Amino acid sequence: MAKKLGVFVSSDQHLDKLIKLCKAAKEKGDVEVTIFFSHLGTMLTQDPRFGELEGLAHMSLCNVGFESHGLKPPVQGIAEGDYATQARNGELIEEGDRYIVF
């Protein structure tokens, strides 16, 4: 059974480290990564490298944080149902085996 890693991203820094983490988890093969972007973390969706995360993790974001920065969908890798509330972050904590914050 795959282990679940929840990643909370509230900073607009360290996208390179996040990409490396997700690639390493994919290589390992038994780790499912779920990322929730909030506050300044939603700004990472505007970085050209953001698309590198697609296929490496299930991603969602705080719709309130996203809209507060004047951002609009669509975003590569974020499904329509993944513009969510902070309840999604709570699910990461509850369902994951590990939880880290960027």
Image: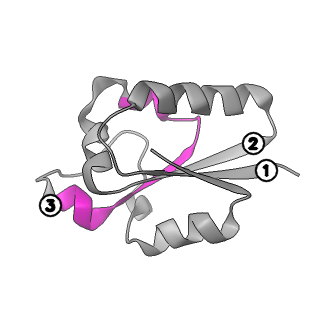
From which residue to which does the magenta span run?
Answer: 50-67
Task: Please report contact status of discs 2 and 3: CB closer than 8 Å, yes or no.
Answer: no
Give the alpha-carbon distance from disc 2 to disc 3, as whole Å: 32 Å
Residue in the picture at 79% in, 33% down? 29
Q: Reply yes or no: does residue 19 show up in magenta.
A: no
Task: Please report contact status of discs 1 and 3: CB closer than 8 Å, yes or no.
Answer: no
- Where does the image place residue 99, in percent across and percent down from the top left? 61, 55
Residue at the far front: name it: 101
Give the alpha-carbon distance from disc 1 to disc 2, as whole Å: 5 Å
Q: Residues within 10 Å of mark 1 (few under 14, many from 20)?
A: few
Up-down relation of residue 47 to residue 83 (above or below):
above
User: SS for tag 3?
Assistant: helix
**Identity, as a three-letter code, of the amino acid under mark 2:** Val
Give the alpha-carbon distance from disc 1 to disc 3, as whole Å: 33 Å
- Residue hosting label 3: 68
Up-down relation of residue 55 to residue 69 (above or below):
above
Which callout, 2 or 3, points at the residue further toward the start of the chain? 2
Please give left or right for residue 73 compared with residue 38 in the image: left
User: SS for tag 2?
Assistant: strand
- Residue hosting label 2: 31
Q: Quadrant of the C terminus?
A: top left
Task: Please report contact status of discs 1 and 2: CB closer than 8 Å, yes or no.
Answer: yes
Q: Reply yes or no: does residue 58 show up in magenta.
A: yes
- Residue hosting label 1: 3
Residue in the picture at 10% in, 53% down? 70
Q: How is the image coloured?
A: one colour
